[in-house]
Amino acid sequence: MSGPRRVLAALVAGAATAAARGGLDWQPPGGAATWTRTNHRGEPVSLLEGPAVAAGVLAGVLVGSDRPRAAAAAAIAVTGAGAFGLVDDLREDASTRAKGLRGHLGALARGHLTTGGLKVLGIGATALAAAAVAPPAGGAAGRPLTRAADTLASAALVAGAANLLNLLDLRPGRALKAASLAAAPLVATPGGGAACAVLGAASTAVEADLAESDMLGDAGANALGAALGTALVLGAPRAVRLTSLAVVVGLTLVSERVSFTQVIERTPVLRDVDAWGRRPVTPRSGTGPAT
């Protein structure tokens, strides 16, 4: 992939994210209240960033891929993740006790389909379609059984990355920073178009996200994660893909028992990176003097 095409992917993703966000803000579908949630400070925050970022990433991967199959794979992955994430954002049943991947799968096993369960199934299906469409990369071609195994592993990587990035969307800027750090080393690979789309969309969205007026929600975080997973599928050797899948699965399992936020707050380097650009937490009234 040429350098100019990578730059174009980032620029188009950033511009499309800004244009989509402006259009949605001008006339929010269903009204502004439909998209308003309460953040960790108890303050109102808009979910409109999510679909805007998903649209930006989609635009970026379409212009940034120099192979039709690569563009199709990335578009399928991003569209599916963003769409099913949006359903969960807007239609989630707040009364359900199903939380996390284990909770939604457990509910599904009992015959109850939550919006989270629908998202798991939907993103899994579109990730599988994306992996099947994607051109072989780094030794993925070979015997039919080998190709089938690689396709399943790639689908798991795309879906797992979409879910994992969403788990980080608990504080302003966290998921965007993580996505950007993960995308940077992929820019020079054959999956660089998707990686640059992530960087372009994230750079546009981060200001409002850090200002705590916007948040990614499932739609934005899932779309970014799916794009990162697709970038790995398109550009990384099999060993790297399988290692990445193992890391994604391991962190997802750990998240069921360990709070990422608590780990970050206890680790100085992670805490500093996580807090960069964010408003400091001010003590509540009556808890003591400000420092």
Image (cartoon, rainbow, N blue to C red):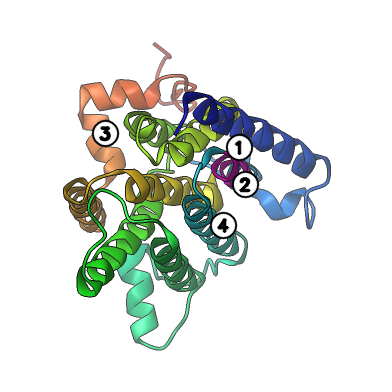
Q: Name the residue nearer the viewer: 65 or 102.
A: 65
The residue indicated by pointer 4 is: 79
Mark 4 or 2, closer to the camera = 4
- Type of amino acid under label 4: Thr
Verify CB contact (< 8 Å) between mark 2 and mark 1. Answer: yes
Does residue 206 sit above or below 243 in this rendering?
A: above
Q: Residues within 10 Å of mark 2 (few under 14, many from 20)?
A: many
- Type of amino acid under label 3: Ile
Residue at image position (49%, 52%) is 74
Mark 1 or 4, closer to the camera = 4
Q: Quadrant of the N terminus?
A: top left
The residue indicated by pointer 2 is: 47
- Type of amino acid under label 1: Asp
The residue indicated by pointer 3 is: 264
What is the distance, in whole Å, between disc 3 and disc 4 at their CAs? 30 Å
Element type where label 4 sits in the image:
helix
Which residue appears farthest toward the right when viewing the image?
27
Q: Is residue 59 magenta?
A: yes
The residue indicated by pointer 1 is: 214
What is the distance, in whole Å, between disc 1 and disc 3 at their CAs? 22 Å
What is the distance, in whole Å, between disc 2 and disc 3 at their CAs? 24 Å
